[in-house]
Amino acid sequence: MKNTLTLEQKNVAELAGRIPCPSYDRNNLVSGMVHIGVGGFHRSHQAFYTNALQEKYGAPEWGICGIGLREGDRKIYDVLTKQNGLYTLIVKHPDGKVAPKVIGSICDFLLGVDDAKKVIDRMADPATRIVSLTITEGGYNFNPSTGEFDFENRDIQHDLQHPDAPKTVYGFLTASLKKRRDKNLPAFTLMSCDNIQHNGDMARKMLLAFAKRQDTALADWIEREVCFPNSMVDRITPVTTAADIAYLEENYGIKDEWPVTCEPFIQWVVEDNFSNGRPEFEKVGVQFVPDVKPYEKMKLRLLNAGHSVLGILGALHGHPTINACMEDPTFVTYLRTFMDREATPTLDEVKGIDLNAYKDSLQERFANPNIKDSVSRICSESSAKLPKFLFETLQENLSAERSIEFITLIIAAWCYYSDKQADKNGQPLEIIDAMQEELHQAAKQTATDPLAFIKQESLFGNLAKNERFAKSYVNMVGKIYKDADVKKYMETMI
């Protein structure tokens, strides 16, 4: 390219000659949706669908205002503010085709740590009709063992005592809903887009628990007026790399400080349950259904669980990426056998879905050589993910006296991973987990108490007291601690 242009609104007309750009008038967008947690996934998924709706049908009342509540959101806030909400979505196909496109559906961005009142006012604005969330599993603030709200969290305590200066998502939601109620405005819909089974039900349960402790009359109003649709979301979205940024500059002359990469596959299944209207997303491929639960369970227990199977075992073996795992026949066979033998028997009937074809498609998606999703990203925050992705499946299989060996090996591998924080060759692993220190300390005791790791009841509940599971776990953790060669033990199981 002769000249490099920064990605911002004033350059869109010129950039449109190089790469697909928004053709709709972004000046007309109104933020009918407020989204908390503007990470890569939101930008490859909900914002992508919203952009498609604007492009094809025009829906200016459904722009997106991004919200960051933590100091850690400052970087994305700074980048998107500088770029007028614009970013490039780089879709990487398995055959090597790369299809970049500029997305324009985010029309504003606010940072709660800088100005809480401004965020509350925006959420309370009559134009805001949906507040959506991608705050990760850990953001819902529940005890993974009991499923109940964690009132011991210091920031939650702060929000209960200082309702007008909140720090957490629950403080912001209750403050804005109180304003709406007091002004006789209709409630917004709270729409979770996180990988939690029954994510809408979980958002409802947690918000009401907080609200009841803060203001019982407001909690009653929320219970009556706010809708919490469950949804199932799906698109593999790896962490953006410096190479992705360089690719855009070298091939298109675009300086985008934080593009997003993703696979071509995308799916969104949502319960049609909204308080105050919704975009006509069905026009761009979103499925609206009366009950999303079977789809959620299928995705969490096959795709998300499958990712964790490959991530933890792959990390210990030394595979750097998910597609590298899928180039290893042992990992491919282990994954499919886990899905067939331990995950599938726990699923409900999923209308319109051929489960064998779905599992075939997952293997193809995981093997995409152009995505290169790092195992460290997949393993991040495992303490929040595994209870929903794997432990519920394990509990059901124990109750039904079905196979548990595949999941047990993963838990034993997770113990070694948390203890040694290195792969089988002694190479250090990048551990990203809010419970990293607790996991490490519990795993360190394995030498003297082989059940120490699974005695963490906040994660495992009473699993350590289940004789069948405990016996299998002790056997497997002993083998892994002997030589850390997980692949050898995987081979004996398939």
Image (cartoon, rainbow, N blue to C red):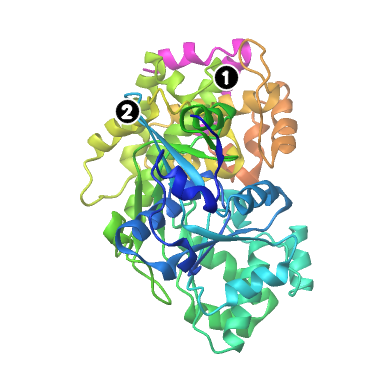
The C terminus, quarter of image: top left
Q: Name the residue located 52 percent from the left edge and 16 percent from the top edge.
A: 486
Based on the picture, tell me whether residue 232 belongs to the magenta stretch.
no
How many numbered marks does the figure carry?
2
Q: Specify the quadrant of the image occupied by residue 95.
A: top left
Q: Do the numbered discs 1 and 2 sit on residues whose CB atoms are within 8 Å?
A: no
The label shown at residue 479 is none
Q: Amino acid at mark 2?
A: Glu
Q: Give the labeled residue for mark 2.
A: 364
Q: Nearer the viewer, residue 243 or 131?
A: 243
Relative horizontal placement of residue 422, taking residue 100 as reference (left or right): right
Q: Give the labeled residue for mark 1.
A: 316
369 over 56 or under it: above or below = above
Q: Secondary structure at mark 2?
A: helix
Relative horizontal placement of residue 41, taking residue 423 as reference (left or right): left
Magenta-colored span: 469-494
